[in-house]
Image (cartoon, rainbow, N blue to C red):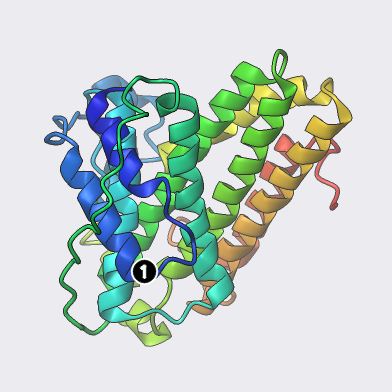
Amino acid sequence: MDADTVDALRMVVGLDSHDPDERALAAVAAALSRLGPPAAPTRYTDEERLGLPEDLYEEHDVFFGAVRVTGNPVQEFTRTMLEAVKGQLHDALSAGVTLGTDEWDQLRDSFRTVFRLLWRVGAADTHWAGAERDTDAPPAVAIRPVDVDPLMRWRLGHQVFFALIQALVVAVGCVEETLETEPDEACRLLEDATVLMIGSGAALRFAGDFTRPAYADVVRPAMMPPHINAKFSGLQLRDHRMLLKGFGRIKPLVAKADPEVRETYGFLVAAMSTAYDAHVAVCARFGGDREPSLRTPESAVAAVDVLDRFRAKRIGAVSIDGGRSR
């Protein structure tokens, strides 16, 4: 980890989930200023476009404003986390939220966990980590009250969700590296991943934190022709596919691990189920309990029923016990 990234993380690693949102936003903005300019964006290759043509990853990224980059992977991953939480906090402070305190704390806890994980595994052992911390409070970020922009909230909430899924990919990869040699660290990483998974569900609820008419009149039409290809879906997320592959690699290792590891992994799978619950709840809130998914517009099956099938299939695939409830 380079000095700029360590310096940026030092600004946020001490944040607590109960710190005022204004203070957290100021710290995150200051941390971003410690990083260099963003890396150059990268483009999808023809091989990637042809590999899974039905998933249209590129179109999904463009709609939600997700930019894939090259460059220093640790610094760019850190920037991604900081940008995501900055957008979330700024939008919430300027337009307001109706999420409950528990859900908002889950979001705050998830990013606090990411920053502390990055510090623990990447920064703590560097000679930059011992540098004296800046005791001056970072400058406040100007906030101008505005009405909720439903399409912006939808996109920002999904960007937060994507960032947390990427963080889960990293955490699960670290679990894979430590399971057989450092079971205590593997348990700690699984606990971190559980916090991130719960936060990802809260991110989806944040994405849908606006009125039903706004979804019907503004958001849903923006995800349909002529603005976007038919059968557009949030299921078209390449990071989610990478996460499921990571689960597939650690599942057989967990199955033969110590009971404590298996139990901690079970909590992660249970949290994954609650994240799907959040997806189903948002879908139902906007009529998905009556209407078909954008991915299957001619179907007689309601969108929430499709999501329930995906949940059962995916929870069953990652569960050691085949998906039985805990």
Query: Is residue 97 at all visible to an observer of this figure?
Result: yes
- Whole-percent x and y of residue 86? 28, 57
Query: Is residue 155 at all visible to an observer of this figure?
Result: no
Question: Which residue is under mark 1?
Answer: 21
* Residue nearer the viewer, 158 or 106: 106
Instruction: Residue at 78% x, 42% y: name it.
Output: 266
Give the answer, above or below, for where 123 lies relative to 321: above
Q: Amino acid at mark 1?
A: Asp
* Residue nearer the viewer, 133 or 203: 133
Instruction: Residue at 61% x, 57% y: name it.
Output: 276
- Whole-percent x and y of residue 96? 34, 80
Instruction: Residue at 43% x, 61% y: name it.
Output: 294
- Within the image, what quadrant is residue 33 found in? top left
Q: Is residue 259 left or right of residue 66?
A: right
Give the quadrant of the N terminus: top left
Instruction: Residue at 70% x, 20% y: name it.
Output: 179
Q: Give the class, few, some or many, for how many residues have Cα within 10 Å of label 1's Cα (few <14, many ≥20).
A: some
* Residue nearer the viewer, 315 or 260: 260
